[in-house]
Image (spheres, rainbow, N blue to C red):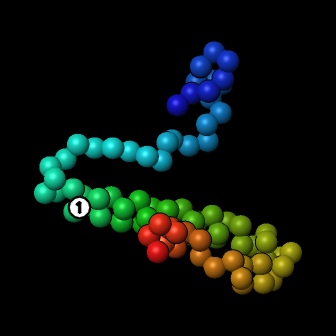
């Protein structure tokens, strides 16, 4: 996805890829594949979140030793639709 007056990569302002994907698969495989994809994506997000928190922790903790005490773990929580 590109944005900008001339639709050139240099002017792209979209911060990430679209988060919706589709695939044509056999109906008998759909649930298994869906579950595998959801697990793989969730595992990667958890790894990314852990690395970001590890990088931010020393800076934030210096300002507030309890900075992460009440924020929980947003990555890995079920979406409202899944609850």
The residue lying toward the viewer, choosing from 38 and 68, is 38
Residue 47 can be seen in this image:
no
Relative to residue 46, is residue 70 depicted above or below? below
| Residue shown at the point (57%, 66%) measured from the top left | 49
Counting from the top left corner in percent of width and height, residue 45 is at: 49, 62
Counting from the top left corner in percent of width and height, residue 36 is at: 29, 62
| Residue shown at the point (86%, 75%) measured from the top left | 63
Relative to residue 58, is residue 66 depicted above or below? below
Q: Residue furthest top?
A: 6
Q: Residue furthest right?
A: 63
The total of numbered circles placed on residues is 1
Residue 34 can be seen in this image:
yes
| Residue shown at the point (61%, 37%) measured from the top left | 14
Instruction: Answer left or right for 22 relative to 53.
Output: left
Instruction: Answer left or right for 64 relative to 18.
Output: right
Classify 10 Å Cα crowding around label 1: few (below 14), some (14-19), many (20 and above).
few
Counting from the top left corner in percent of width and height, residue 28 is at: 13, 57
The residue lying toward the viewer, choosing from 12 and 82, is 82
Give the image quarter of residue 35.
bottom left
| Residue shown at the point (57%, 27%) measured from the top left | 2
Instruction: Answer left or right for 66 relative to 14.
Output: right
Counting from the top left corner in percent of width and height, residue 9 is at: 58, 24
Report the residue marked by disc 1: 31
Q: Secondary structure at mark 1?
A: helix
Relative to residue 21, is residue 76 depicted above or below? below
The residue lying toward the viewer, choosing from 23 and 81, is 81
């Amino acid at each position: 996805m590109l944005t900008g007056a001339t639709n050139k990569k240099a002017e792209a302002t979209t911060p990430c890829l679209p988060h919706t994907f589709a695939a044509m698969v056999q109906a008998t495989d759909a649930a298994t594949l869906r579950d595998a994809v959801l697990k793989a994506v969730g595992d990667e997000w958890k790894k990314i979140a852990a690395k970001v928190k590890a990088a931010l922790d020393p800076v934030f903790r210096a300002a507030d030793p309890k900075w992460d005490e009440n924020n929980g773990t947003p990555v890995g929580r079920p979406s409202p639709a899944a609850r």
